[in-house]
Amino acid sequence: MSILIDEKTRLLVQGITGGEGSFHTQRCIEYGTKVVAGMTPGKGGAQVFGVPVFNTVESAVRETGANASIIFVPPSGAADSIMEAADAGIPLVVCITEGIPVMDMISVHSFLKGKPVRLIGPNCPGLISPGKCKVGIMAGEIHKQGNVGVVSRSGTLTYETVAQLTGLGIGQSTCVGIGGDPLLGTNFVDVLKLFQEDEETKAIVLIGEIGGTMEQDAAQFIKDKVNKLVISFIAGASAPPGRRMGHAGAIISGNTGKAQDKIEALSAAGAIIAPNPAEIGKTVKKSLKY
Amino acid sequence: MSILIDEKTRLLVQGITGGEGSFHTQRCIEYGTKVVAGMTPGKGGAQVFGVPVFNTVESAVRETGANASIIFVPPSGAADSIMEAADAGIPLVVCITEGIPVMDMISVHSFLKGKPVRLIGPNCPGLISPGKCKVGIMAGEIHKQGNVGVVSRSGTLTYETVAQLTGLGIGQSTCVGIGGDPLLGTNFVDVLKLFQEDEETKAIVLIGEIGGTMEQDAAQFIKDKVNKLVISFIAGASAPPGRRMGHAGAIISGNTGKAQDKIEALSAAGAIIAPNPAEIGKTVKKSLKY
Amino acid sequence: MKIHEYQAKALLSQYGIPVPSGDVAGTPAEAKKIAAGLQGKVAVKAQVYAGGRGKAGGIKLAANADEAEKSASGIIGARLVTHQTSARGAPVSHVLVEKVVEVRRELYLSIVIDNARKMPVMIASEAGGMDIEEVTLTSPEKILKAYIDPSAGWQDFEGRKLAYGMNLSAQQVKPAVKLMANLYKLFHEKDCSLAEINPLVITGDDSIMALDAKLNFDDSALFRHEDIRRLHDPAQDDPFEARANEMGIKNYIKLSGNIGCMVNGAGLAMAVLDLINYCGGNAANFLDIGTVNNTSAVISAFKVFTADPDVKAILVNIFGGMARADTIARGIIEAYQQIDIKVPVVVRLAGTNVAEGKRLLAESGINYIEAADFLDAARKAVDASKGGRN
Amino acid sequence: MKIHEYQAKALLSQYGIPVPSGDVAGTPAEAKKIAAGLQGKVAVKAQVYAGGRGKAGGIKLAANADEAEKSASGIIGARLVTHQTSARGAPVSHVLVEKVVEVRRELYLSIVIDNARKMPVMIASEAGGMDIEEVTLTSPEKILKAYIDPSAGWQDFEGRKLAYGMNLSAQQVKPAVKLMANLYKLFHEKDCSLAEINPLVITGDDSIMALDAKLNFDDSALFRHEDIRRLHDPAQDDPFEARANEMGIKNYIKLSGNIGCMVNGAGLAMAVLDLINYCGGNAANFLDIGTVNNTSAVISAFKVFTADPDVKAILVNIFGGMARADTIARGIIEAYQQIDIKVPVVVRLAGTNVAEGKRLLAESGINYIEAADFLDAARKAVDASKGGRN
């Protein structure tokens, strides 16, 4: 098993005819993902790498039975695209787009409330169940099928972590990049819950960063509900306070956003903390030996 | 037992200092309802018939433990009042106000979604559990405690029905006026469900009218889930089609809103139909003998 | 509340929705002048609230300004009888003179409230230009719906769903989606109860345009739209209903019978019509007096009844709740003092303050017929309407 | 994005929120003229983005126009050092000259986004005029919150809750509720990330007014607010960051160390700072190059590094995803061709198209230091920054 995506995933690419959309469509297909449909308004009837393009998500779902969507639509139209996917009944929507206005995301979350849909992102690298399915922009070849679940707020730091794991021969069940925005569809706790329930996943790597209290919430959940090994790293311990560091989410507000507080909360919850970002893999390897 | 309100109901009156608000506050108190608080912005600190008045619902709930609210606020402020009650955590909100703009009610319903609150109305007479509690504008003295539940879209036609029942010695468990507006907080099915679950209620009187499909929905529910005796009357059989008859809800749109269709649906579901509005009570009496 | 087509089109235009060039004329001379300004073929359209104008001769095509003047003179000042009007028809005081556009496709677009879902719904169809209820019955697959979730407001994806669903071409989709967004903005900001464009047309030059338009407004929201309220044309109302309205009786509908009915509550008022019918009589009106706090509404209702030559008997049936029986009784007594009431009046009072109301009536010395209960009231009124007394 | 107080107040005013009379001045003479027009006592307020102006001498009271001119001449053209600025301080090019109002009560009002609840929250407090974070710690019961549910938008009951909660008098409540509704309208329509009025004051004549105001805007939404974008004053930015910004590097923050870092992804960029720190070095900057599709961003980053005298070594750490390693490699090679790079450059590439990237670098003949992995890259960069090479 794995979480969220696997061989049964039938992927729709929203914004498939754009540069990033078509590039990553090809990469996902190469990795083995069943990309069944693309969607770009006005491009209905075209094909991209053999994938049929539709004008609306509704028609794409009706014609192809797509059950997951990945969004490469520019920021001004991305919120509309998320809602379109949810409206069409797609249960898993992964939004890669960075820079969606916060007010638009507030509308999105209000719209999604009560609907049977999980949003991953926005401003995220997507997710991958190695050897089965890739719905994201990560380089597939650095991954290896196995039983460590990875969840992270950061894209490239996740790649770094995964490369370390794979280099040490440790495979992954699923790697989920939840995104760097302040208003996220899926948070650490949501993914921890899925990993805890997934039999294949034996240990969990959680990559947090400064800002917000999501890691503290994760710590509480780990304490209460997770009986699997959790290894963690929090980026930004050396960042000066009060400055925005790229991710909109990474602003230290009050005391709660500091790296040290997060590390202490996770450590108290039983998570093992990697000493530095270059030794996350090594820490996992050592921990797994216990 | 009874449904929704009883001796444990602690009532807040929103708009208590207005003419209708204060008149009916007195009537409710006389009937035995525990009116614990009133609310009118700017009148905090005053008293109406010994009931303390607050500036906000939040403070009224905090100070008095009110667990139900009745709203006599003019149409322009009524939607805001419903939301204020729901926001303050009041589980039962009864809105008497007639003439609330439809767009305001759309906002209200969107706001209430997912919140633990039941709205009765708007544009309704409220409800009464005879001998226990009155949260409405009906004349209390025409009622008699007993075991027939009454649910109706109309105010005065309910009074007429109740007076017939009481005149024949038939008491009521609870009488609920769900209101005459097109967008209602509580519909027939909601109340039928409660009556079905209520042990005290032995039979149910359902007073419908032309327009919409709420009676058809009720018929379906009766067929599927109700094993108690249901007696029904549908007002408006002699109304000319296409005209608005007072209630915004009473427009015959398409075929579905006609009295005859409703009567047939209810009859097919096993409900007994009263031959005319003056003989609803008599029909109940006859039916109860079976 | 309804408004005229020309007013609806002015509002659409204000919200960025294209409509044909044209203007409204109150005289044939004005119609000629407008037609001359437009050049080429024009349509002269009678401005009435009722639908079905085309078949009833209310829309004339004119090749030039002179023909337009002639058409206008045949329409302005006349009464137009359509399948939606009474036999007397609706008075026409104005015509809309519009440039005729080349029509390539006729579509349908409207917004109404879905009561069950509690949100606005936009309805679109390829089968424009015809009666949409007909289309609903014969070709339901041609009716497309997009719900507008109030939690997020209008979203363009809904518009694209409808636009592609109507098989618009790639370059027609964007302006159509924009038009839909604008129509919803109008619907929402002006508290419409119906916004209908039928037909919405694709013109010869591939642009999109509202060829006919109907806007109805939520009466309950007019308090915040003085600009809309002012658009109302009382000449289009039934004269009896207009008079009742002027006198403050909001829920009055003229019917074909002879018993004037004054009831409180719409449900009870309908039940009274049903019961009169059951007893073999016919009501002259539906009248929900509503919640009366003073006697003037009661007096007004009696004035409406006495002004109606059809009324042979009056039935007052009040079950006090918000309305109080004693106030009604006082109103009846004052009405007898102010008006010469020639027909029999049956009164049945119950509910809030009923004892006081009955006492007042009994002591007033007025010549009314007291009813014991609901059925008794209907029977006595039907008897009286058939000359059983007086 | 931040704007100046005078610009924020102009926006508040546009949304119907009362602010003191006054105007902005770029010269002491202008300040004098404005003060003369206002009559009576005025405040002369330095316009800088940083907070803490009062204690830093950035706000002067002046009894008349001549005093205002004198105060302005002491402020305009100088640099203001507050606890929120660097030691160099912020340049002051303008002052806001405002009529002094009699203050009876100082309140606090702001709107921000609550990320956990995913909706805007309005925060109010009786304890205005002070640091609100201080109040949160010392008197949390004085912090009132009202969440604005997007499904229904702003509702006046929320405003009343806050207004009565701040113990406003009966006649102050209505204007306060109106002001809150207007502030939310501004926040919502202009895509603010923060709208703060501190203090919100009750004046001597019992009216309510924004005495100081701060508006920040969502950078991601500026594409639809050209009017707001134009308000930005680049003179308030850190000069290095401004230069980076001009060159298209959005996520650049100047730090105090000596290793110039170019990384893709904010999390990885932070991790690089952490790792440099762990290896005993210090970064000269945070730089998330983001998703680069062409070489120009890479070249710009190198230009930023070489212009910074603090930079003693450069570390490029790229893990390709959306960004592709070969594009980065091409950028580095072009940068070497275009710029005289005097400091050692450590390069570590991984991820998407890494093989091609490494090949390009290897074949280019440029003098760079290749790193085997993440830790190796950081160690080599720290070594290099300490003169270990070159």
Image (cartoon, coloured by chain):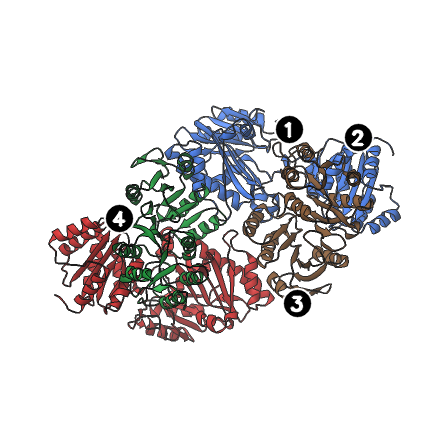
Chain colours: A brown, B green, C red, D blue
Residue occupying the point 81% across, 47% down: D329
Taking D77 as reference, is C238 above or below it? below
What's the residue type where badge 2 is placed? Gly
Check residue B141 in the rendering and tell me which mark sits there, or answer none. 4
Position of B93 compared to A233: left or right?
Answer: left
What's the residue type where badge 4 is placed? Glu
> Can you tell which of label 4 and label 3 is closer to the viewer?
4
Q: Position of residue C351 (x, y in %)?
A: 25, 51
Subunit ID for the residue under disc 2: D
Taking C137 as reference, is B33 above or below it? above
Number of marks present in the image shown: 4
Taking D179 as reference, is D330 above or below it? below
Q: Provide the residue designation for mark 2.
A: D280
Q: Provide the residue designation for mark 3.
A: A45
Marks 2/3: CA distance?
58 Å
Marks 2/4: CA distance?
87 Å
Marks 2/1: CA distance?
30 Å
Subunit ID for the residue under disc 4: B
Label 1: which secondary element: loop
Q: Provide the residue designation for mark 1.
A: D89
- To which quarter of the image does residue B45 belong? top left
> Can you tell which of label 2 and label 4 is closer to the viewer?
4
Residue farthest front in this picture: B290
